[in-house]
Image: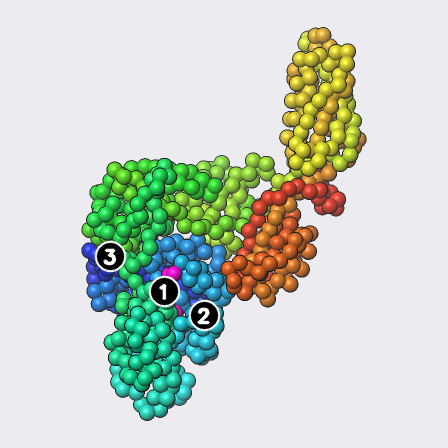
């Protein structure tokens, strides 16, 4: 819900900037429970944006305003929280850490120019965080690390920093060391390695800055030397290393300038210890965000084309350039309506401006291609759920717009006179199907309305109306994602239930068979008369359907032969033993009888249908199940468990190979029946502690084992 500023303890007006150089867009990433949302509140409070930080357990944080997030006590959606520090506007983009909401993470990465990895000093990190670091490295995104939860009794900063260095690689070095209280347990201050100064937080923020005590100097000296060597190695001044090795004292100002340059270019990754509850390190982190992270002017912009796909010149982050912006997130507020979070890449977005909204390439996810001209009524600076009106939003900045009639996540907003389209970002494939059923006709109407809203804002969800199983299926990222989707549907007034997901099977003849179809009815007046005899023989897999006739002597008049084929095809579509389509057969019409008066097209269609059913009763019909080709990416330590699990799913492992990305992961290739993959997204995550992912593609149909086929036959008989 959009709220007035005072409702969240917001102090002062919304920050407004006129040039991209005064903007920093920072996405916070890390595993669930690392403390990202709590850290955002601490940064907002330290900068004076809010009067005091909220708490996740109380549901009072700025970014976790969704009712589901409050109830679950974890982030489930991307949220933007801007602050101003030393004249610089920092747009903090808080992302969920749970794997089910990776679509929100992708949106945050798209909107950001740098990433702050939040790692708990208690829990370490998960495999997804390590993989994301490599992903950011591949595109050169600047990164830094904030180590949180230092106030916990099990916190181990040294081990956490060492873990970050092992997982993230070179040039991950701390800028500060912890200073313990007299009890030798509690962290009450930081020792600055570059400045060789002590920052004492015993009395909270701001820190008391003083010279180090004699006992601090040995620890500072060793760590400082390593840090300086890392900074100098990235310096553009080639003489600096020789001067340092020669014993020269390098000026602090020179070291700080080189550090900031290396961080902005994505070559150096500082580690800052922080504690959101006590304020420890929060001011140091603010300084890093504003001074070392790059401006939007230094970040590559996405590729654009014309709406028709024609190439366009590269974008420049210029407030006076052509308007090009992207909707990175869309939500539906019950009071405000559609709220779109927008990153402006070029030009300036203003109220009352007529723009072109365009979305292409997401039809398979339930987002048909669309183009429309709309008027931007108001432009807002979002602060979690609160919306504060601003006069404009320049290139490089992030804002929100409301009440758009067509804007969906991933859409491009551009000038009406020159419509453009931004290349979409990569979206993960949803792999957990959930079948839903509305309880009444009124609920069906409400369901359709609410589903269109959800699909507009969540491109990771795919909506499928399966014409074969007649089920409405929501493809989600996992159980937590599905739970949130269902909760939002029910919150919109829809009474619904879930049901087991049915896999679309096929039927076929295992052996050749003969069938006799006789449809004779005499009830006075015009009757019905048709008799036909057919032979059915199986074709190879993917052989389709063939129809032939060997009728001699006109036993079946020529004009009724297509009618027999229609009847056979109709029965094949309806299925014979379990209600699934019949495939891969050849049907030959060999004989029959007709009546000069009572025979008709409809009668021979019915006879053809009866003949196929008779052939099935006399022969052997088997069920075919879809088999998918599956590629599972798992940590090396989980390969054995995954391969063993594949065998339990009637899968056939085709082989393994190292992950081409060069990480400690293995690709397991296998063929698995689709009926065994309905909940594999959930079970794989559990099996690999969140480190496994997979993709699937249809391969072919294969006969289902007899005992399983019999179960499907019984279920079909009981449902009649």
The span shown in magenta is: 140-145
**Which label belongs to residue 20?**
3
Q: Position of residue 97 (x, y in %)?
A: 44, 62
Q: Position of residue 596 (x, y in %)?
A: 72, 7
Q: Is residue 411 visible?
A: yes
**Which label belongs to residue 169?**
2
Q: CA distance from mark 3 to mark 1?
A: 19 Å
> Image check: 420 left or right of 11?
right
Mark 3 vs 1, N-terminal side: 3
Q: Is residue 166 above or below residue 678?
A: below
Q: Front-most of 30 and 540?
A: 540
> Image check: 665 left or right of 193?
right
Label 1: which secondary element: loop
Q: Is residue 654 above or below residue 405?
A: below
Q: Front-most of 221 and 696?
A: 221
Label 3 close to label 2 by CB (< 8 Å): no
Q: CA distance from mark 3 to mark 2?
A: 31 Å
**Circle 2 residues within 10 Å: few <14, some 14–19, many ≥20:** few
* Residue ID at (67%, 33%): 543
């Amino acid at each position: 819900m959009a709220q007035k500023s005072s409702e969240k303890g917001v102090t002062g007006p919304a920050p407004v900037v006129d040039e991209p150089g005064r903007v920093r867009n920072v996405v916070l990433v890390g595993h669930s429970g690392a403390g990202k949302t709590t850290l955002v509140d601490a940064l907002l409070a330290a900068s004076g944006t809010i009067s005091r930080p909220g708490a996740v357990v109380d549901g009072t944080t700025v970014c976790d305003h969704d009712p589901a997030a409050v109830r679950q006590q974890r982030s489930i959606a991307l949220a933007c929280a801007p602050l101003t520090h030393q004249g610089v506007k920092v747009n903090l983009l808080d992302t969920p850490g749970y794997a089910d909401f990776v679509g929100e993470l992708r949106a945050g990465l798209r909107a950001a120019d740098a990433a702050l990895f939040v790692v708990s000093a208690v829990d370490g990190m998960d495999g997804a965080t390590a993989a994301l670091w490599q992903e950011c490295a591949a595109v050169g995104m600047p990164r830094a690390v904030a180590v949180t939860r230092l106030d916990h009794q099990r916190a181990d900063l040294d081990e956490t920093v060492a873990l970050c260095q092992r997982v993230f690689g070179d040039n991950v070095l701390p800028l500060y060391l912890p200073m313990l209280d007299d009890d030798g347990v509690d962290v009450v201050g930081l020792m600055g390695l570059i400045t060789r100064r002590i920052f004492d937080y015993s009395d909270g923020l701001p820190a008391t800055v003083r010279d180090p005590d004699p006992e601090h100097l040995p620890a500072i000296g060793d760590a400082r030397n390593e840090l300086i060597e890392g900074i100098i190695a990235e310096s553009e001044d080639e003489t600096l290393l020789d001067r340092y090795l020669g014993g020269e004292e390098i000026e602090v100002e020179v070291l700080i300038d080189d550090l900031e340059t290396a961080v902005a270019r994505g070559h150096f990754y500082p580690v800052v210890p922080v504690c959101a509850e006590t304020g420890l390190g929060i001011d140091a982190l603010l300084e890093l965000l504003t001074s070392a992270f790059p401006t939007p002017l230094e970040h590559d912009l996405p590729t654009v084309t014309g709406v028709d796909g024609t190439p366009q010149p590269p974008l420049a982050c210029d407030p006076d350039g052509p308007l090009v912006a992207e909707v990175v997130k869309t939500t539906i507020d019950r009071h405000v309506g559609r709220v779109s979070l927008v990153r402006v890449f070029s030009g300036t977005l203003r109220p009352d401006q007529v723009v072109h909204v365009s979305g292409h390439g997401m039809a398979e996810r339930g987002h048909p291609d669309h183009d429309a001209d709309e008027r931007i009524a108001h432009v807002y600076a979002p602060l979690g759920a609160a919306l504060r009106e601003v006069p404009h939003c320049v290139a490089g900045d992030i804002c929100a717009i409301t009440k758009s009639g067509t804007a969906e996540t991933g859409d491009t907003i551009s000038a009406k006179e020159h419509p453009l389209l931004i290349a979409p970002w990569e979206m993960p494939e949803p792999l957990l199907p959930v079948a839903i059923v509305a309880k009444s006709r009124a609920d069906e109407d409400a369901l359709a309305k609410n589903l269109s809203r959800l699909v507009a804002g969540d491109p990771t969800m795919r909506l499928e109306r399966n014409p074969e199983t007649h089920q409405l299926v929501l493809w989600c990222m996992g159980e937590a994602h599905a739970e949130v989707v269902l909760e939002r549907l029910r919150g919109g007034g829809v009474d619904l239930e879930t049901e087991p997901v049915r896999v679309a099977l096929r039927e076929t003849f295992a052996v050749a068979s003969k069938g006799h179809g006789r449809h004779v009815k005499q009830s006075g007046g015009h009757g019905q008369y048709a008799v036909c005899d057919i032979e059915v023989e199986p074709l190879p897999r993917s052989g389709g359907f063939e129809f032939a006739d060997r009728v001699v002597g006109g036993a079946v008049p020529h004009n009724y032969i297509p009618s027999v084929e229609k009847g056979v095809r109709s029965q094949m579509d309806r299925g014979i033993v379990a209600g699934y389509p019949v495939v891969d057969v050849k049907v030959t019409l060999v004989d029959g009888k007709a009546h000069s008066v009572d025979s008709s097209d409809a009668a021979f269609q019915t006879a053809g249908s009866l003949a196929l059913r008779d052939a099935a009763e006399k022969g052997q019909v088997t069920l075919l199940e879809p088999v998918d080709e599956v590629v599972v990416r798992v940590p090396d330590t989980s390969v054995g468990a995954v391969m063993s699990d594949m065998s339990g799913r009637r899968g056939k492992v085709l082989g393994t190979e190292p992950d081409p990305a060069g990480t400690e992961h293995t690709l397991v290739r296998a063929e698995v029946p689709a009926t065994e993959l309905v909940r594999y997204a959930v079970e794989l995550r559990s099996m690999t502690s969140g480190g496994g992912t997979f993709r699937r593609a249809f391969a072919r149909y294969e006969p289902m084992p007899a005992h399983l086929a019999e179960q499907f036959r019984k279920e079909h008989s009981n449902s009649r």
